[in-house]
Image (spheres, rainbow, N blue to C red):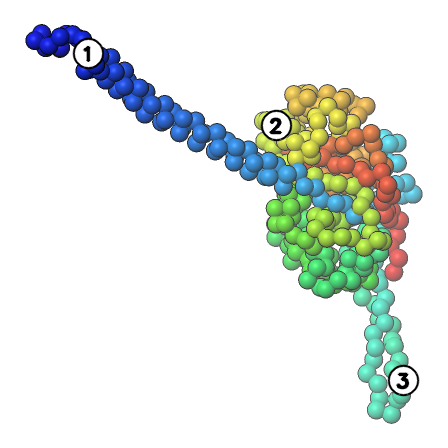
Amino acid sequence: MLLWPKSQAASGAWFWFCCVAAPNGMFLILFAIERAGYEGLWYRAYWRNHHRSQWLASRLRTAQKPLQVLGVSYCLPLGEQTLASAVVAGKRLPKPQLPRTGSALVVHSRFEEANWTVYEPVMSDPDPGEEHIEAEQTSQQISLLTLKIAQALEPLEKSLRALTRYEQVWWPQVRVLSAHGGEQTDVARVTEALRIAGLPPLEVHATPASDGLMVADAWLDAKEARPLLIVATAWHEAGPPEGSAEGCVAVLLTAGYFRLPDTVKVAALLHRPVAGLAAEVEYGFANAAIWGNADSASIVRAWITRPVDGCDKALRAARMNAIAKDAAQRRPDRIVGDFGHGNGWLSVAAAIESGAADGPQLVIDGVQSALLHITPATTNTNRNTDDRPQA
């Protein structure tokens, strides 16, 4: 209005257009431009969050996909008792005894045999005039550990043979936990054990022993349709660690991509394991519950081996108060002995053999943890605790 010429009357359509309509129209145009930018940013953020939520939900469903446990078997120096009954009894099996080499007593648990001889028939070359081939008996020296692995694999023969009726490309693969430098020896030992047990010639590979339970994580990430047989061993020819144990454990898993034969049953569901940090192990426990698609308060039992400092405190911090009590905890390593990097798989075998619980169970091996659901319909496990292998 101050800029309006004095020579013109302050009235009329042009006056009101210049003084009212034009300024307000400019304001509305600038406001619309600003609002359009804001709305654009809002819709961009909204749809980005929408698609990210769908992506996260898909990733979470993938992470929560469990492995089916088709069977577990073990060969341990337990005498006549089973692994589950030994854990329930609570009597420590490691005792002061001489190692295989050395003169100092060490508290450990081991098999009594020092070696074993297996007799196998070898066909001799026939003479040209002979009609039949005579077999002569020869002896072949085989390590005791190889025979114990064969013993542990024998109860899984029915399931393995059913799974090898398909083409060989779908046959189970074998992963053996192996220390650095012993990969070739361990692969050869398991291959020989498969032959002794009369099982099909499965493909055997070594995986670092430090992986422990995380072998299942790698198998889930690989999205393999083939079943997986995990073999963990503990053996000490000389200088066994205090409180250690000998033996072998075998666990047969599948990712559930194809229908199983009728003779093969699912004994349990093993969810994706988690490797946490020693200083923040409670976050690992919480993630294990998330990957297991279970509420932290619903976990009823913990199988603990090689616990980190403040394990009970970490369980309470992860809102797992029910298993932070001694009554809800099982400690296979205290009963059987320290099984090394195979402790986690030993706990899986013990949990399945113990039978179905009222809810999910948490397997803890150091900083590694995984949730286990026992299938009520099939809770029986294959076992072999005879200290003397059958030749």
Mark 2 and mark 3 lie on one chain; the one further toward the N terminus is: 3
Mark 2 and mark 1 lie on one chain; the one further toward the N terminus is: 1
163 in relation to 352, above or below: below
Label 3: how many Cα within 10 Å (few below 14, some 14–19, many 20+): few
Q: Which residue is mark 1?
A: 12
* Residue occupying the far left of the picture: 7
Identify the element where label 2 is drawn: helix
Tell which of 228 and 49 is nearer to you.
Answer: 49
- Residue 171 in picture, x, y percent from top left: 72, 59
- Residue 186 in picture, x, y percent from top left: 69, 55
Q: Which residue is mark 2?
A: 283
Identify the element where label 3 is drawn: loop
Q: Disc 2 vs disc 3: Cβ atoms closer than 8 Å?
A: no
Three-letter residue code for mark 1: Gly
In screen coordinates, is 52 left or right of 42?
A: right
Residue 90 makes an appearance in the image: yes
Mark 1 and mark 3 lie on one chain; the one further toward the N terminus is: 1
Q: Which residue is mark 3?
A: 132
**Foreground disc of the pair 1, 3:** 1
Three-letter residue code for mark 3: His
